[in-house]
Image (tube, rainbow, N blue to C red):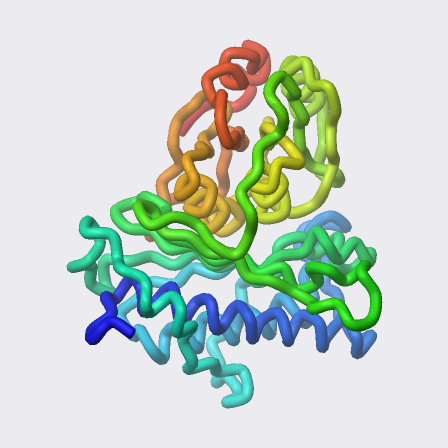
């Protein structure tokens, strides 16, 4: 282990550990059968007991170890004491052994902003589409997503008894991404991944304009980025409101760490400063390569309907 790991690498190591704890919570709530679902703004915007417990666990755990961090979570929860059994103080030792990229070695806690989506794909979680579900912890510096952790609590759940359940992906700009095998869609194939439950005319128009060979409709921003880096899709297209900073911070960091790109539908980068608005109001376009091609195909009516910030 490095004699004195940097703040960033310690934070990523802690985020990895609490993401694994979060996965245990997510599974435990599901298996209990007591999801305690709340509709936040409608039937497609749900919150479960797992969302609430995981956000408490992540925020309290990271705040305890890094008290000067700014942490922004999806769920609007009351300020109240957090049970000790939700606190994770461990760190992933393999991450602590990695060298921090030079540009981040002197970062301080108070310069970092953490964006937390405790359960990305909540609707799918309630419907049993468990491979769509992720826990997202993104880390930003000066408005840029520089590191991220994605946990899939139910990875391998369809493999039957004996399968190792769950996995954690992580990445840091300038270091790379880990926990998965990077693959690309074969040359010449355009496979679009997009929303399964938040589609509208703009989304459909943008997807069709890409002239895709196939379209995959799945839940969760984290899940869609995993589709890109594992070669199941060549572009993630979401030409609409709905996606927010906690949905994209961690996935963007991992995608960028392997050479991909995530922008709004105009090609502009999103910012993750503490004071930005939470909505990604100009949609999301993410690719592992050929980003400019997909940007060039976005219809004018879509661009006009989604003004860039």
Q: Is residue 117 visible?
A: no
- Please identify the residue farthest to the bottom as the structure is shown: 84
Q: Residue visible at 47% across and 73% down?
A: 17
Please identify the quadrant where the C terminus is shown. top left
Is residue 307 found left or right of 128 in the rendered image? left
Q: Residue visible at 39% across and 26% down?
A: 268
Q: Residue visible at 67% across and 26% down?
A: 191
Q: Position of residue 32 (x, y in %)?
A: 79, 78
Query: Along the line of sight, which residue is nearer the eye, 164 or 220?
Result: 164
Q: Is residue 79 above or below residue 72?
A: below
Please identify the quadrant where the N terminus is shown. bottom left
Q: Position of residue 175 (x, y in %)?
A: 33, 50
Query: Along the line of sight, which residue is nearer the eye, 305 or 112?
Result: 112
Q: Is residue 270 above or below residue 274?
A: above
Q: Residue visible at 63% across and 40% down?
A: 227
Residue 211 is drawn in which quadrant?
top right
């Amino acid at each position: 282990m490095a004699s004195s790991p940097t703040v960033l690498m310690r934070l990523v190591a802690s985020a990895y550990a609490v993401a694994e704890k979060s996965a245990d919570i997510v599974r435990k709530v599901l298996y209990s059968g007591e999801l305690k679902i709340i509709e936040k703004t409608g039937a497609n915007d749900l919150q479960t007991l797992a969302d609430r417990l995981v956000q408490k666990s992540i925020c309290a755990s990271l705040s305890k170890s890094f008290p000067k961090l700014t942490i922004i979570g999806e769920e609007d929860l009351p300020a109240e004491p957090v049970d000790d059994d939700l606190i994770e103080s461990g760190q992933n030792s393999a991450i602590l052994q990695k060298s921090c990229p030079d540009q981040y070695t002197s970062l301080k806690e108070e310069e970092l902003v953490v964006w937390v989506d405790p359960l990305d794909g909540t609707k799918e979680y309630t419907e049993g589409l468990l491979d769509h579900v992720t826990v997202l912890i993104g880390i930003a510096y000066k408005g840029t997503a520089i590191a991220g952790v994605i946990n899939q609590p139910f990875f391998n759940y369809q493999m039957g008894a004996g399968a190792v359940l769950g996995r954690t992906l992580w990445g840091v700009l300038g270091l790379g991404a880990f926990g998965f095998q990077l693959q690309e869609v074969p040359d010449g194939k355009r496979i679009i991944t997009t929303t399964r439950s938040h589609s509208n005319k703009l989304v459909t128009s943008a997807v069709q304009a890409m002239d895709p060979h196939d379209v995959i409709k799945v839940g969760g921003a984290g899940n869609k980025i995993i589709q890109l880096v594992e070669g199941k899709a060549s572009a993630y297209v979401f030409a609409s409101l709905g996606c927010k900073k906690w949905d994209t911070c961690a996935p963007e960091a991992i995608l960028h760490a392997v050479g991909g790109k995530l922008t709004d539908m105009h090609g502009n980068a999103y910012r993750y400063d503490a004071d930005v608005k939470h909505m990604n109001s100009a949609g999301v376009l993410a690719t592992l390569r050929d980003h400019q091609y997909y940007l060039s195909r976005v219809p004018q009516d879509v661009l006009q309907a989604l003004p860039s910030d």
